[in-house]
Structure formats: structure tokens, C-alpha cells
């Protein structure tokens, strides 16, 4: 039987058809009827089936290192929270939750904290993700409403991507953008890095990080001078501070703006002219805008331009904040941030009274609670004495994660609800609660364009895993609130959420699910995707007291000069085939090899100046901490800036833990941390030997050496290693079995294979100055019934083609294979590569990479 559900990953919110093929296996296809993807899936969605096994799952409640019954664990959590509140007040406890919870989970957690515990100390990882957009929308519109939908992309003539690596992070939206560009729309990408998203753009502005306000204010002034402001819309529907227009020109002329942003006057002018000339413009933005110490101002700088040109609430003309996590938007709807109450209501007396009435709540939170960065600081100060973390991994993903780890270690009572047994955060928990995972849970999610979809269970939860809503309501009931949390199923919670959205809502709150909660459980089960809110702002009315939107005066902050000890700017972000702390994508061998190690990308000039070799190791330092990476020189990077990925953890790497590096500083309005620019330094790290370790299943132990990073491979795991200690110490990682060994003293090379009844159990290849074979053939040997006699040569008898870094995850095709085919077969475009090799013909996520290889090869040949 095929089940309609949605993808586990990003905020695009693609619909999936899931057909179980066994107790824990499933065939995944895109749902052709889902409006978000119309049948398409990216590399991550396509390979979801590889992640549904039980490897690493937390299957039972754990108190300390001991298995406990649900009753015992829930009683303990309820008792410790109750006691802490009784002794130190409701402000002494906190929940830290996640945009990866379902709306129903989120609703219950928010209700428990804000209405029953009586504190608003519930914040979410969306604070690190969306909160500047929330604050910017609230300032401009009076309510956190995203007016755009994906259909606007299909109607736009100009698409501007600001601080968004859409090709990697929202691949299906990107495919929609490409399709629109092929029909004639123009694409402008504004990102300090030349990402794969930028590679195919009509114009890429590699601006100085943090100069977006200057760029957008300059654009606003340009539009005014070009006469493209919408005077009627401004007069009827927008209000502005008195001196707003007088101050717009403060950023200066084209030349000064180009100077501030460090782009050429010609490029800047091209962008401004294009924007001024194209009424149907959609501006999409994400973390390059939100994750900044001036994120809220940056959001308003974008929204100002759209309001002033009347490009809002109309087909193809919208500002469009795209969400990251699958249910970041649903979390905003239930009010899961410490700074919002519920159902798009704030903490005004009137709203508090209304929600209190609706919930029949004993003790409503009086004021907003602690935002994530403050919350963990107060945890460190000892003011928060009990913390419950759900569906997020703050020991990895919070800024200054070293301090977060110390705070977790010192907290008297930490509860972690997760689907995995071993996470960096779980290591600090007194109680670990096994949550039902994607594919086992049931409820709703809201994607970037306000489309609400059902996520449905494919499997029964394994072991004793339970859905998050169930866990929270059980604790609430044990804390004494039995009737308020008498939910038997997600549909009960959904109906209450729908009622709250319409409760005493005369239209002043746009968020309303009117008409969606009437049916019974069967109707909930059958719910088809729908978008709430119709077309917000189409009539020019905004949910402010006077019905007008607001222009907000925002000014470019002077960008600090490089510091003597920290001369570089560290930028952090994502890889195409990894998801956050990799607890799910890390299980999928197909996704592992696109980037198998955490790289630090450095401009070649900086590398030369700082003595960094491409492929060598380097230590990135900031005042908060340091981390190791493999160096990748790239002129896609601006000089003076570094880029590192966020995905590696203590469990997957001895280095590359990026969370240790950013400052625990946040935008003063939204509280969102400035993850994209941290003053930093970098230095090469010399190693004596390097190599790799490949083992069947989990047979090899974690290597204890300077550099060790792990990925999943078919039938096993692989560690890349490097170090300067005694290489023989790595032998201890190998499983028992028959060993064969080869040593080449001159090059300091050692190769060991361990066989188990003729099958390959593990290999260890190390060298000081020699070459290492490619890993692919050895990895394939794990699945062979008998290891080949040439195993220590690392290749089959005869020629061996090195595929290079994997580009196409669907068909396992690497850079070198593609470049060779382009050269020898004279392939001229992406379609020709597809016809020759298959690459890019399935999910399409690698099409931007193929386009870039074609460009590189052309430039190279010329
Ligand atoms: N593959 C994959 N996809 C994901 C995720 C994932 O982990 N992996 N996570 C999901 C989540 S939760 C999120 S929030 C989204 C994030 O999606 P994105 O926002 O697209 O991703 P990031 O890589 O964080 O950053 C985006 C870009 O901002 C640029 N940038 C940095 N500083 C500046 C600046 O000052 N100005 C401008 N204009 N740009 C700047 C960076 O160079 C980077 O390319 O992705 C979602 N999708
Ligand atoms: N330096 C830097 N740091 C960043 C960012 C950045 O760009 N740069 N981006 C930030 C952003 S935008 C985000 S969204 C965060 C993401 O950071 P996190 O939220 O910490 O990342 P995940 O790895 O997705 O963590 C989700 C956890 O929930 C578990 N889980 C999955 N499904 C369920 C479930 O149904 N129930 C429960 N209880 N658990 C579940 C997973 O196993 C995993 O441990 O990182 C932030 N941190
Ligand atoms: S774009 Fe990819 S990761 Fe995002 S929801 Fe769609 S299939 Fe999933
Ligand atoms: Mo995010």
C-alpha cells in the first residue's frame, strides 16, 4: 500500500509516495499531486529509504545509562520539573525544541510551558534559523506572515536570491527557478561566495559579507530616482517614519554603495536597472540574511524595497523568506518561539487573557521567555535548573557550542527526546526519551509557502519509541494537568489548534485555519495539502492596527576592520547532501560521498600567503574555540573569508566541529545569532601520515588520532585519518580475523587487510609520502563474497579509473568521470552529459554542478 507523506528534510516540503517493501524498508517516489514538488525529489529526499533502518536508534527510555520503563522515566521527568518549579519558580525550567517537530508536538509543548508551567522559557532552533524573518515581518506587516507562494516563482520575470544557496538547500525550489529562467526570467544571486546557485545566475554579486543593508537601501534610492515607486500603493497602504525618505539617500551614490559592498559599479548598476525595470520580481532570502547580528534590519531592508515598489501580494511580485526545516513554519504558527504566544498572537494583555481563557490555563506566562542564546547562557549561570531538549542537537548547532556543552554538563537535570541513541547533546542527558522518527510519526507540517501537509506513518515505531506529542502530554498529565492534556491522537490536537486560530478572531489575525478542523479523525487522516491565508495583502490591507504596512528605517552598520589576531571572516553553512548534525543523512551511503570530510574553503591567494596546501589540514581558530578541517582552495571564495560546513559532530569527526567557533552574539531585535561572520584565524597543521580505514558494518573502532572523520559506505563505514603519533596505534581499531599486511619502508606505507572466512572485514591503508588508492574499489569489496587477491594493491587487476568526488548521488558518478566524458565525447551541455552518463537525469540535484563543470572545462580548454 502506498502512503502519501512529506519529506523529512527541508522547508520546501515535498510530497512523497512511500511504499513499504519490508518491515523496515520503503520505496520512495515524489508525489506528482503535491503542489510543492509535483513529483520531483532532490538527492536527500530520493535517498530517504536508506535512512529508515534501526541502526543507532534509541529504542527505550534511559535514566542515566540504565534502561527504564516509560512509567519510571515519565514520572521522574514530571517530578523533577514540578520540584524545580516549586523551589525556584517557573522561570527556572526551560524547553528547547525544534522545527523538526510536527505541529501537534509543538502545540502541546508550547501549551504546557506557556499556559500551565506559566513561563515562556520555550525556545526553538528556529531562533537560529528564522527569527530575524519573524521579527522583520512583524515590524513591517504587524504579523509574521509570508505572503509568497511557490506559484509566484512561476510568474516572476526576475528572481533575486539573497543569502540563499538554493541549489543545495532548497533544491526543488531551485529546479522551479531554473525552469522559470529557461522560460526567460532573469536570476540574480547575492552571496559572498560563488556557490553552485550563483554559477548559473545571470548576475552574481559577491558582496562583502554583512553589507546587504547598504545594497538594498541603495536599490530603494535607485528605484525612487528611476520613478518606479508605487505612489498610489504607498499613499493608500503604507506608512513610513517622517524622515524615512529624507534618509534613504544617506547610503550615498552608486559609487559609494559599490564601495561599501565591494562590488563593481557596473554590476551594481546592472542589478539596479534590472530590478527597476521588472515589476514581477520575487526576492527569496534565507540564512545569509537571517543569521546576522543585523538580521532583522536586513530583512526589513528587503521588505522596504518590495513595499515601496508595490511588489507584494501580487502574482510574481513578493518578498519571500524561505524556511529551513520541514516544520519551521508550523512552529511559528503554534507560537513555539519564546517571543510569541500562540496562533500568531503576542504577549499583549488582551492576547494573554484570550489564550488563557481558551486553554483554561491556570498560570499564563506573563512575558516573553529566554531566547536560545540567552537561555543557554542562563543555563550556564545556573539560573535554569531543568532543561528538556526535543528534536535538536544544541551541543553541535548552538554558537559557542563549547560553552553550551559546559552549561549542559552543569545543569542539574537535562532531558533529551531524540530518535538516536548517541548524539552529542544526548551525552549530557540525565534522561533520554526515545521519540518516533520520520516514517513512524503522524501529524502536520507547514512548508515555506504556508502549505500544510500531513506527514503519515509508514512503519510502527520500533522498540518503545513514542511520538513527541504523546511524551509531552504524558509528562503534563503527570504534572497534574490531566484534562487539559487529554489527547488520544494527533487529530485531537489539530482540532484544538484550529479552534485557537479562529478563537475570537474577527480577521485581525491573518493566521486562521477556519473550516479545517470540523471533520472527524477520518477527515484528518485524509487531509490533502492546502495553503492557508489565500493571497495575503492582495487587497493592500495589512494586519496592523491601521491596516497599513510600515517602512522601517534601517541603516548599514559600519563593518568592522579586520582584527590583528583574527584577520579573517568565518562563514558557515551547508552541503548539498548532508543535513545538520547528520543523524539521518549520515546513515545513507549514497549521500556520504558528495562531501566525505569537512572542508575549509580558502581563496588561493590567502592559502599561498598563509602557507596552506590544498588537501592539507588546517586549524581554524576563533576566540571561542578551534576546529580542524581539510583545506580546499577555491576562487569561489572571497579573499579574507573562510567557509566551513556545520554538519560534523563528536560522533562523526575528531575535527570539523563548527559550532565551537561562532560567537554567542545575536541580533538585538530577533535574538538570532550571527553565524555567517565570525572573526577568525587559520594555520596549517602538519601531519606525518594519512590514510583511511574501511570496515564492514560497525566492525572498526573509532580511530584515536588527530584527524578522523567518518562516513557511511555500502555495507560498512569508512574513516579518513591523519596524524603524527604512532600509526601502529590504529591497528587497535581493526576487528579480529586473518590479517595480511604489506609494508613499504621507503614511503612509510602500511596496508593491512582483515579477512573473515575469505570475506573482507576491514582494511587500513596509511602512508607518509606515497599515494593512496581510491576508496571505491575497496568499499565494493566489503560486499563481495570473497576478497580479491589484489586487495592490498587497493585495486582490481588492470586499469582503475578514479571517479573523483561524487557529483551525482543517484548514479554514483564522480567529477573525473564527468570531465573525461566532456573531453572525449565533446559533451556540450547538461542534457548531453545526462544522455552519455545518466548523471543529473534522476533527482536533478547535481545539474548545477554539471553546469559548473562544463563552464570550468570550457575555461580550461580556452
Ligand atoms: N542540504 C541541506 N539542505 C538544507 C539544510 C541542510 O542542513 N542541508 N538545512 C535546512 C535549513 S534548517 C536551513 S535554515 C536552510 C538554509 O539554507 P541557506 O540559507 O541557503 O543555507 P546556508 O548554507 O546556511 O547559507 C546561505 C548562504 O548565505 C551566504 N552568506 C553568508 N554571509 C552573507 C551575507 O552577509 N550576505 C549575503 N547576501 N549572503 C551571505 C553564504 O555564503 C551561503 O551560501 O537549508 C535547509 N536545507
Ligand atoms: N555555525 C552554524 N550553526 C548553525 C547554523 C549555521 O548556518 N551555522 N544553522 C542553524 C540552523 S538554521 C538550524 S535549523 C540548526 C539545526 O541544528 P539542529 O536542530 O541541532 O540539527 P539536527 O541535526 O537536525 O538535530 C535534530 C535532532 O533531532 C533528532 N530528531 C529527528 N527527528 C526527530 C523527532 O521526530 N523527534 C525527536 N524528538 N527527535 C528527532 C535528530 O536525531 C537530531 O539529533 O543549526 C543552526 N546552527
Ligand atoms: S527539496 Fe529535497 S530535502 Fe527538501 S523537501 Fe524536497 S526532497 Fe526533501
Ligand atoms: Mo534552519
Image (cartoon, helix red, strand yellow):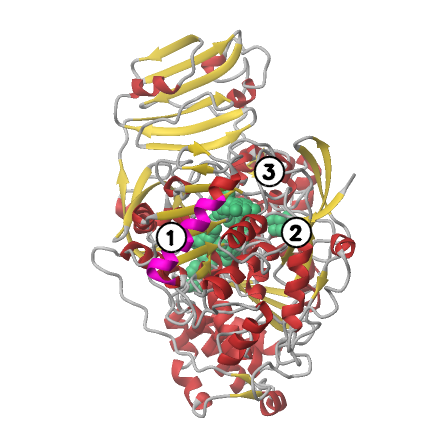
Q: Is residue 20 visible?
A: yes
Mark 1 burial class by Cα count in 10 Å: few <14, some 14-19, many 20+: many
Question: Which residue is most to the left?
Answer: 564
Pointer 2 or 3: first along the chain? 2
Asked whether 322 or 723 is in front, the reply is: 322
- Tag 1 residue: 386
- Tag 3 residue: 809
Does 359 lie within the magenta span? no
Asked whether 161 or 227 is in front, the reply is: 161
Q: Is residue 663 visible?
A: no
Q: Nearer the viewer, mark 2 or mark 3?
A: 2
Dot 3 lies on which element?
loop
Image location of residue 516, percent across then percent down: 73, 65
Image location of residue 761, percent across then percent down: 49, 15
Drawn side of residue 727 relative to residue 96, left or right: left
Asked whether 60 or 704 is in front, the reply is: 60
Amino acid at each position: 500500500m502506498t502512503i502519501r507523506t512529506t519529506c523529512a528534510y527541508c522547508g520546501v516540503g515535498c510530497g512523497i509516495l512511500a511504499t513499504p517493501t519490508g518491515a523496515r524498508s520503503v520505496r520512495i517516489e515524489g508525489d506528482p499531486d503535491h503542489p510543492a514538488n509535483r513529483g520531483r525529489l532532490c538527492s536527500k529526499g530520493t535517498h530517504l529509504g536508506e535512512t529508515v533502518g534501526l541502526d543507532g536508534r534509541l529504542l527505550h527510555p534511559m535514566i542515566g545509562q540504565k534502561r527504564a520503563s516509560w512509567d519510571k522515566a515519565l514520572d521522574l521527568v514530571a517530578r523533577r520539573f514540578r520540584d524545580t518549579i516549586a523551589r525556584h519558580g517557573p522561570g527556572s525550567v526551560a524547553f528547547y525544541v525544534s522545527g523538526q517537530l510536527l505541529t501537534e508536538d509543538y502545540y502541546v509543548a508550547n501549551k504546557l510551558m506557556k499556559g500551565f508551567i506559566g513561563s515562556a522559557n520555550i525556545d526553538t532552533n528556529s531562533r537560529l534559523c528564522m527569527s530575524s524573518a519573524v521579527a522583520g515581518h512583524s515590524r513591517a506587516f504587524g504579523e509574521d506572515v509570508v505572503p509568497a507562494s511557490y506559484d509566484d516563482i512561476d510568474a516572476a520575470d526576475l528572481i533575486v536570491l539573497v543569502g540563499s544557496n538554493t541549489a543545495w538547500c532548497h533544491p526543488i525550489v531551485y529546479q522551479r527557478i531554473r525552469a522559470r529562467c529557461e522560460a526567460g526570467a532573469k536570476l540574480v544571486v547575492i552571496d559572498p561566495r560563488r556557490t553552485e546557485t550563483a554559477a548559473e545566475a545571470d548576475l552574481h554579486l559577491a558582496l562583502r559579507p554583512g553589507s546587504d543593508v547598504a545594497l538594498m537601501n541603495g536599490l530603494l534610492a535607485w528605484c525612487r530616482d528611476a520613478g518606479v515607486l508605487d505612489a498610489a500603493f504607498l499613499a493608500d497602504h503604507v506608512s513610513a517614519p517622517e524622515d524615512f525618505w529624507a534618509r534613504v539617500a544617506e547610503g550615498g551614490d552608486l559609487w559609494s554603495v559599490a564601495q561599501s559592498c565591494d562590488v563593481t559599479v557596473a554590476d551594481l548598476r546592472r542589478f539596479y536597472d534590472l530590478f527597476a525595470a521588472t515589476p514581477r520580481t520575487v526576492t527569496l532570502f534565507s540564512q545569509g540574511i537571517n543569521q546576522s547580528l543585523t538580521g532583522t534590519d536586513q530583512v526589513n531592508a528587503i521588505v522596504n524595497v518590495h513595499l515601496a515598489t508595490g511588489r507584494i501580494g501580487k502574482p510574481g511580485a513578493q518578498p519571500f523568506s524561505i524556511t529551513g526545516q520541514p516544520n519551521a513554519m508550523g512552529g511559528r504558527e503554534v507560537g513555539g518561539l519564546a517571543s510569541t504566544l500562540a496562533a500568531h498572537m503576542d504577549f499583549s494583555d488582551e492576547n494573554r487573557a484570550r489564550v488563557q481563557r481558551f486553554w483554561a490555563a491556570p498560570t499564563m506566562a506573563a512575558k516573553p521567555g529566554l531566547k536560545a542564546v540567552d537561555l543557554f547562557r542562563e543555563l550556564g549561570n545556573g539560573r535554569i535548573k531543568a532543561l528538556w531538549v526535543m528534536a535538536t542537537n544544541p551541543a553541535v548547532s548552538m554558537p559557542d557550542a563549547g560553552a553550551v556543552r559546559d552549561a549542559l554538563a552543569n545543569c542539574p537535570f537535562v532531558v533529551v527526546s531524540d530518535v538516536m541513541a548517541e548524539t552529542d547533546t544526548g551525552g549530557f542527558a540525565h534522561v533520554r526519551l526515545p521519540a518516533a522518527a520520520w516514517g513512524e510519526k503522524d501529524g502536520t507540517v507547514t512548508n515555506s509557502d504556508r502549505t500544510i501537509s500531513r506527514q503519515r506513518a509508514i512503519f510502527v515505531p520500533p522498540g518503545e519509541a513514542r511520538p513527541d506529542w504523546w511524551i509531552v502530554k504524558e509528562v503534563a498529565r503527570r504534572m497534574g494537568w490531566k484534562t487539559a492534556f487529554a489527547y488520544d491522537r494527533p487529530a485531537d490536537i489539530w482540532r484544538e489548534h484550529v479552534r485557537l486560530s479562529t478563537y475570537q478572531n474577527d480577521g485581525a489575525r491573518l493566521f486562521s485555519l477556519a473550516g479545517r478542523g470540523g471533520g472527524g479523525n477520518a477527515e484528518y487522516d485524509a487531509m490533502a495539502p492546502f495553503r492557508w491565508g489565500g493571497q495575503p495583502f492582495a487587497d493592500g490591507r495589512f494586519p496592523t492596527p491601521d491596516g497599513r504596512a510600515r517602512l522601517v528605517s534601517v541603516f548599514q552598520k559600519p563593518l568592522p576592520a579586520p582584527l590583528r589576531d583574527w584577520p579573517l571572516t568565518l562563514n558557515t553553512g551547508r552541503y548539498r547532501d548532508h543535513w545538520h548534525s547528520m543523524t539521518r543523512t549520515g546513515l545513507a551511503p549514497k549521500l556520504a560521498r558528495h562531501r566525505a570530510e569537512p572542508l575549509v574553503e580558502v581563496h588561493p591567494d590567502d592559502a599561498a600567503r598563509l602557507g596552506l596546501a590544498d588537501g592539507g589540514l588546517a586549524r581554524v581558530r576563533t576566540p571561542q574555540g578551534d576546529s580542524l578541517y581539510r583545506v580546499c582552495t577555491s576562487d569561489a571564495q572571497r579573499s579574507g573569508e573562510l567557509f566551513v560546513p556545520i554538519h560534523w559532530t563528536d560522533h562523526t569527526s575528531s575535527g570539523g566541529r563548527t559550532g565551537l567557533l561562532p560567537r554567542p552574539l545575536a541580533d538585538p531585535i530577533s535574538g538570532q545569532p550571527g553565524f555567517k561572520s565570525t572573526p577568525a584565524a587559520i594555520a596549517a597543521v602538519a601531519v606525518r601520515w594519512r590514510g583511511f580505514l574501511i570496515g564492514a558494518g560497525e566492525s572498526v573502532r573509532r580511530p584515536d588520532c588527530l584527524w578522523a572523520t567518518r562516513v557511511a559506505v555500502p555495507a560498512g563505514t569508512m574513516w579518513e585519518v591523519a596524524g603524527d603519533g604512532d600509526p601502529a596505534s590504529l591497528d587497535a581499531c581493526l576487528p579480529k580475523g586473518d590479517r595480511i599486511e604489506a609494508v613499504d619502508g621507503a614511503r612509510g606505507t602500511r596496508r593491512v587487510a582483515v579477512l573473515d572466512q575469505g570475506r573482507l572485514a576491514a582494511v587500513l591503508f596509511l602512508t607518509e609520502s606515497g599515494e593512496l588508492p581510491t576508496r571505491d574499489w575497496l568499499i565494493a569489496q566489503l560486499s563481495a563474497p570473497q576478497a580479491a587477491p589484489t586487495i592490498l594493491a587497493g585495486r582490481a587487476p588492470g586499469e582503475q579509473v578514479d571517479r573523483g568526488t561524487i557529483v551525482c548521488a543517484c548514479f554514483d558518478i564522480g567529477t573525473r568521470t564527468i570531465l573525461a566524458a566532456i573531453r572525449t565525447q565533446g559533451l556540450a551541455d547538461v542534457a548531453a552529459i545526462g544522455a552519455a552518463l545518466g548523471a543529473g537525469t534522476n533527482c536533478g540535484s547535481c545539474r548545477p554542478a554539471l553546469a559548473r563543470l562544463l563552464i570550468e572545462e570550457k575555461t580550461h580548454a580556452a
